[in-house]
Amino acid sequence: MSRMPPFNIHPSLLAIMDQYYDVERDYKEPLTLQPFGQKTKGDDSRPMKILYVTFFQYPHTGGLSHYITSIKNGFEKVGHSVDVLAPNHMSSEQLEEWIPEASSEARKFMNTRYGRVNEKIVKNLSYLHVFGIFLKEKNLQDYDIIHAQDLFAIFILGHLNQTYQKPLLFTPHGFFTKSRLKFNKMQKDSIEEAYFTELEKVGIEASTEIVMISDSFRPNLMDFGAKDERMVTVHTGIDFKPRPHKNHENIILTCVSRLSPRKGHGFLLEALSRLREHLTNVEVWIVGDGVMKEKLIEQAKELKLNNVNFLGKRHDIPHILSMSDIYVLATVNDNFPLSVMEAMFSRQAVISTTCGGIPEMVQHEETGILCEPGNVEQLAHAIKRFITNTEERNRFANAAESYARQHLTCQVMTRKIEQIYQTYL
């Protein structure tokens, strides 16, 4: 059995914790990281060796894993070599022995130095340490391009890349600290806010270029110190094969999403309750599972919405969307939701909100209708419009499908990212 290398804390994280807890220290280690990689004409068409790294499980369910798979498949189809590394690829020894050992070391360190321990930070420090060791063993110098897919991966790779000096790209799929503050999963002005904010800033600092999935990421990234000239937007594309649309007697309105507070299902139910007289020939299918399930079922009962069906988690989304006519995602916090893209490919009349990058995907009054997040009146009006006007419903559905096929395919996304990579070869 091999021993875990000595536990250490990255100087920038140590500095931010010392500052928060008012511990004096003379810092000799550099606290800033350098980005590497110079742009060229970008006409190199040779096969590339590409590495994608995520701090989350892969493969897994969810948008991040789906994005990595889409882009991996896209690049392999055009002749490039692609690897993916994630924590669940570590050895059983690293997962079962080294991480608990690193946790113990981190806990002991915090207790000795600060007289208090934060378990979320302990957990993060232990994974950063062991996953960093794992990545260091993987011959990163062999890759032409390294592309991190979350703030933790870019933080670790940013440090390792001070040695390798490779083009290191970063695609954020959300904002860890800001999202947790918004939904009260993290306290304002806490050690957690200070620590995780520093993580985001350092990773961004080390990025050669940031490939955003939507322009809506730009202001937040600039808050963390990202330079405008080092950011580029490439909208997510998917390889979605819709089923042929089936005709049926009732109008079917569908929402496919995790049942969490930020997805806005409660607003959808409230909007439907205002349209009771128009729902006689309408079925509502709510697909997904999550913490809000019982509460939403109860809300539907209280509002006497007998036509609302909770279908739970399903693995036949193309089939469900082939039966559906209207797609609604009343989200109050989102980035570039995969489900809306799938609905567009499936020729749905789409209703969503102006959250995140959705307005870059759905053009209001052209390929769908967008409402203000939480605005039940606007939502009810949009639903009524599509329920009562078949011509409108079909016109928007056809426009959505046409736009998706032209702009939101995996091939389009891969081609654009390939052009970015080639500028660094």
Image: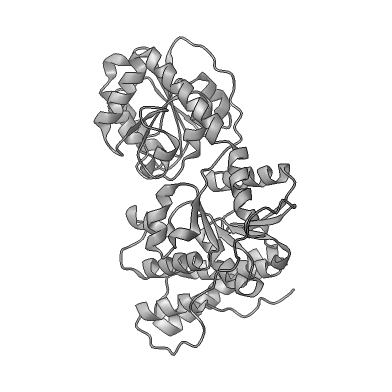
Q: Quadrant of the C terminus?
A: bottom right
Residue farthest toward the bottom in the current orientation of the protein: 26
Q: Residue at x 63, y 55 (%)?
A: 421
Position of 412 relative to 37 (above/below): above
> How far across and down, in percent of the image, does residue 30 sit?
51, 82
> Is any part of residue 379 visible from this angle?
yes
Number of numbered discs visible in the structure rendering: 0
> Is any part of residue 259 visible from this angle?
no
> How far across and down, in percent of the image, does residue 73 sit?
68, 43
Q: Residue at x 26, y 35 (%)?
A: 375
Position of 64 relative to 385 (above/below): below
Task: Report the side of 17 relative to 269 (left or right).
Answer: right
Position of 421 relative to 167 (above/below): above
> How far across and down, in percent of the image, does residue 56 sit?
56, 55
Position of 183 relative to 332 (above/below): below
Residues 227 and 183: in front is: 227
For the rendered model, the colour scheme is one colour
Task: Report the side of 283 relative to 235 (left or right).
Answer: left
> How far across and down, in percent of the image, does residue 334 sit?
41, 44
Residue farthest toward the top in the current orientation of the protein: 249
Q: Residue at x 64, y 75 (%)?
A: 163
Residue 246 location, quadrant: top right
Residue 98 location, quadrant: bottom right
Residue farthest toward the front in the current orientation of the protein: 41
